[in-house]
Image (spheres, rainbow, N blue to C red):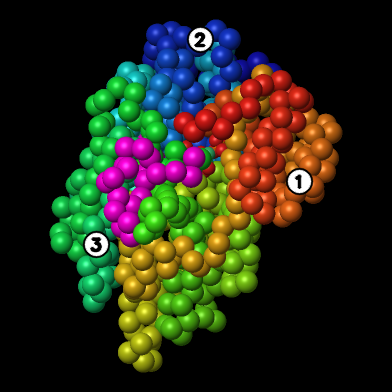
Amino acid sequence: MPAPAIWTWWVKTSAVGSRADKHPVPANVRFQYGTAGFRTIASVLDSVLFRVGVLAALRSKKLDGKTIGVMVTASHNPEQDNGVKLVDPRGEMLDTSWEAHATTLSNASTTDDFVSELAKFVEKLQIDLAKPARVVYARDTRPSGPALVASLEDGLRALGAEARNAGVTTTPVLHYLVRAINTLGTKDSYGEDSEEGYFQKLSSAYLKLVAPRQTPPPLLIDCANGVGAPIATRLATYLGDRLSLVLENTAIDTPGALNNACGADFVKTSQKLPPSLAGRLQPGQRGCSLDGDADRLMYFYIDQRNQFHMLDGDKIAALVAAFIVDLVKTSGLESQMKVGVVQTAYANGASTKYLTERLPVKCVPTGVKHLHHAAESYNIGVYFEANGHGTVLFSPAAQETLQTYEPSTPAQATALEHLRNLNQLINQTVGDALSDMLLVEVVLAHKAYDGSDWDSLYVDLPNRLVKVVVADRNQFKTEDAERQLVSPPGLQSKITDLARRFEGGRSFVRPSGTEDVVRVYAEAGSKPQADELAFRVAGLVYDFAGGNPTSRPK
Ligand code: G16
């Protein structure tokens, strides 16, 4: 359908066309708004950033000038990658119905095509171009960040958007800022719209929650040589002597260091302590890893025999959900507050068993946007991906109850106060490694748990995660929350047959939405069996699609 003339005219006569000419689309690259926005090798992303700037401004106009967020990051990916994602007004991920528009606009191969697609898009969505556009943006520490931000700014300028640069910060701080800006001065105010406001909010809730408890021993934090390092440094100053943070892997200016043999994804994938921490973590001491933009968290400890133990997103969910359920019961709110958990297929089978014996559990496809949405159906929704990405949501009704409920005993009053403070401590816009870390520390302090007490909630089933590089990952299609493959035809039945031959065998295959690989997950009764199942399934994937099985951690 040809674009309506009026819109084509507008787009051409505005600055969009001429500015777009400066950001040509690279040949032979197909972009896709995936699990967490656009993400690929940074050198091809210039045009995408420009167009995302235009799109962010249009999203804001469509929403009557509400502030939209843009984060420039490739999170856990290697340093040479970068990416960009949009954040909606309440601090949540971009409405999924706009993802396809983002993909279409990014792939229009010439300026004329782009202008024409844009015109169709504005017409179809009936966007009133006279409305204001407001955007706040930030980036992580990647060397490619400044140039990509300049392209983004060009896109924002093309639409005359009012733009606020939040500088170099974590993805969760950017999400926080978006919600804080949009709720400023309202009854739903999320906090001061500044990094300072973020630190104040989290730290004051933390200090209240741990006030009657003993100060824990120092916590070692592996910052993945990313933006978590400067932000955790600043957070530490707000915690005073109530939590001492020992920051490791803080080399944000060392080329190639970001996420390299360190960080949350390395720990989860390799199930090992980052080599750089050898000798830094004492037996019994707690440590944790952030990822490159500090939205994922993995805990760990070393036992007295120097054995490494990983406490992943599933273990965080189990710890936190049990704590919240106890508080809800003690406060007398059990009949009014339904607590539930959301996981993905990557959740360890032992964690799912542990949790389903205690509270409702849902399984959804990978991507915090899916988990977040599902968690909204509970009064208190706890969601964590096994990779350490997650948070806890208090529904508007639950927040109202917390404000108005009259406790009848001192024990009820104390539990209620804890729930109110948790509601402040937890960054509910998206998974936030630093907010989650404080949450874990609160629960450990209240339970007087060390790493091994926490670890013993349940015993993980042995598992293995493997990546396979294939010619075209898009040929892999799944259903049933990614637990079943529907394409390539015939592959699922082979995986099912193979898994059946292993005691406690479970395996699934899905295309990554952030890396150009297919992921294979396997569980079995022993570690060698889980490894064997994962590699044999990877072999099947290779046979069906052509590729190169590898379990090399990023
Ligand atoms: C992003 C998403 C997560 C997802 C992860 C891996 O995390 O926000 O929800 O689990 O990618 O996704 P995939 O398996 O599709 O590559 P991050 O930390 O990289 O932004």
Type of the residue with mark 1:
Ala
User: Who comes first in sequence, dot 3 or dot 1?
Assistant: 3
Quadrant position of the N terminus in the picture: top right
- State if disc 2 and disc 3 touch (CB < 8 Å): no
Q: For the residues carrying marks 1 and 2, which lies nearer the camera in this image?
A: 1
Q: For the residues carrying marks 3 and 2, which lies nearer the camera in this image?
A: 3
- State if disc 2 and disc 1 touch (CB < 8 Å): no
Type of the residue with mark 2:
Pro
Does residue 280 show up magenta in the picture?
yes
Query: As displayed, is residue 477 above or below residue 433?
Result: above
Task: Look at the numbered disc 2 and give the secondary structure of its residue.
Answer: loop
Q: Position of residue 277 (x, y in %)?
A: 31, 42
- State if disc 1 and disc 3 touch (CB < 8 Å): no
Residue at 79%, 47% (x, y): give it.
501
Residue at the disc numbered 3: 217
Task: Tell me the distance, in whole angstroms, between the alpha carbons under discs 3 and 2.
Answer: 52 Å
Q: Badge 1, how many Cα within 10 Å: few under 14, some, many 20+?
A: many
Q: Which mark is residue 26?
A: 2
Q: Position of residue 520 (x, y in %)?
A: 64, 37
Task: Look at the numbered disc 1 and give the secondary structure of its residue.
Answer: helix
Q: Position of residue 293 (x, y in %)?
A: 36, 38
Residue range in magenta is 270-293
